[in-house]
Image (cartoon, rainbow, N blue to C red):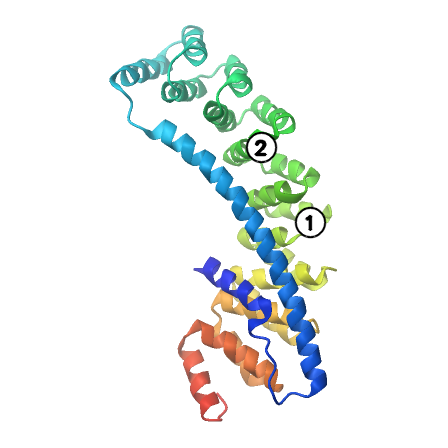
Amino acid sequence: MKAQIYALSLALAAGAGLAQSPAEPPVARAMDAQVQAEAARQHAAQAAADARELDRLAALDAGRLATLKTLSREPTEAEALAIAALEGLMAAPPERALPLLKRVLGGPKSELVKARALFVLSQIDSPERETILLDVVRQGSPVLRGEAIRMIGISGRPAAVESLKSIYAAEPALRQDVISALMIAGRKDVLLTLAQRAEGEELTQLTQMLGALGAVEELRALGKSGKGSAELARAYAIAGDLASLEALAGSAADPALRAEATRSLGMIDQPAARTALGRLYRESRDAGQREAALQGLMIAGDEAGLLALYRAASVPEDKRRILQTLTLLGGDAAMKAIEAALQGEAP
């Protein structure tokens, strides 16, 4: 639900709610037009970035769907028999099982059978396991290469992680699989090292993974290394790191980053986050950040906080913007404020 409200807040940032009141003086209208133009510019940039991310995810999803179709279909009778035989190898000594698994992986069996062979291989505790998996990464089909990388990640052995780092450096097409494997292995340290060297969409993806892992210290180290970005702000929020997010909202040199950090505070379900949003709205002189604070309160569903700001507002345009944000939540406080505004009364 918060993700949907967050998307709505980005739409509001386009300036739809910044239309000036006819009663405002010309100077105020000119300033409002500047704010609206800047908000529209930021929204256009965000929309373009979102479109690129959707294209990237669509391509990844297409590949994952193809893999899913390959590996989730019902086996034929011959495949079912081969899979049953492979599963029997999990109880066999490694010196007996490994040659048979290598023969299956290098032979004419279907990818469904070979994928099961990879799983059986991942259950065998032998130094040779990683060597065989790496052979599949180098020579296998796209489906099997991705599965082999995942199996390397599941093992979590130091040698396996070093292998993943080598694959990441040498095979750009397999980086998504490597990142997923490192996430499975819980290797926040390696993901941080990769993120500190990355740029663009690669950095975005690694930052997202660190956020999903709740890697607070690693995200802070990423920020200190100069990798501050809108994605880092969102990752702080996903990881629940209120202190870092509040610091970014207060100190980032880039106004757009300050606004994103402020907006993302609404994703942290803590009273302190909502208090910080109210304070930023009251104290900031940056119109974009004040608008983001309102959007953050909307994301948080903080009717009480918005109503308090509405009651305290003395500038008509501020009251209008806060009321508009409050009414989007549609709760009791919003209805009371609407009724009071229509009757010309204080809420």
Q: Residues within 10 Å of mark 2 (few under 14, many from 20)?
A: some
- Which residue is pictured at 56% across the width and 55% down the height? 237
Please determine whether, in this image, residue 152 is positioned above or below residue 298: above
Q: Which residue is mark 1?
A: 223
User: Number of numbered discs present?
Assistant: 2
- Which residue is pictured at 67% across the width and 59% down the height? 257
Horizontal placement of 194 versus 115: left or right? right
Which labelled disc corresponds to residue 178?
none
Image coordinates of residue 16 in percent, x first then y, are 56, 72
- Which residue is pictured at 41% across the width and 8% down the height? 100
- Mark sitting earlier along the chain (1/2): 2
Task: Tell me which corner region of the image, top left, top right, bottom left or bottom right, holds residue 116.
Answer: top left
Which kind of residue does numbered mark 2 sit on? Arg
Q: Secondary structure at mark 1?
A: helix
Q: Which residue is mark 2?
A: 175
Outermost residue, left direction?
77
The residue lying toward the viewer, choosing from 136 and 191, is 136
The residue lying toward the viewer, choosing from 308 and 233, is 233
Report, in whole angstroms, how far the alpha carbon at label 1 lies from the one at label 2: 22 Å
Image coordinates of residue 286 in percent, x first then y, are 69, 71
- Which residue is pictured at 55% across the width and 68% down the height? 12
Q: Could you tell me if residue 51 is visible in this image?
A: yes
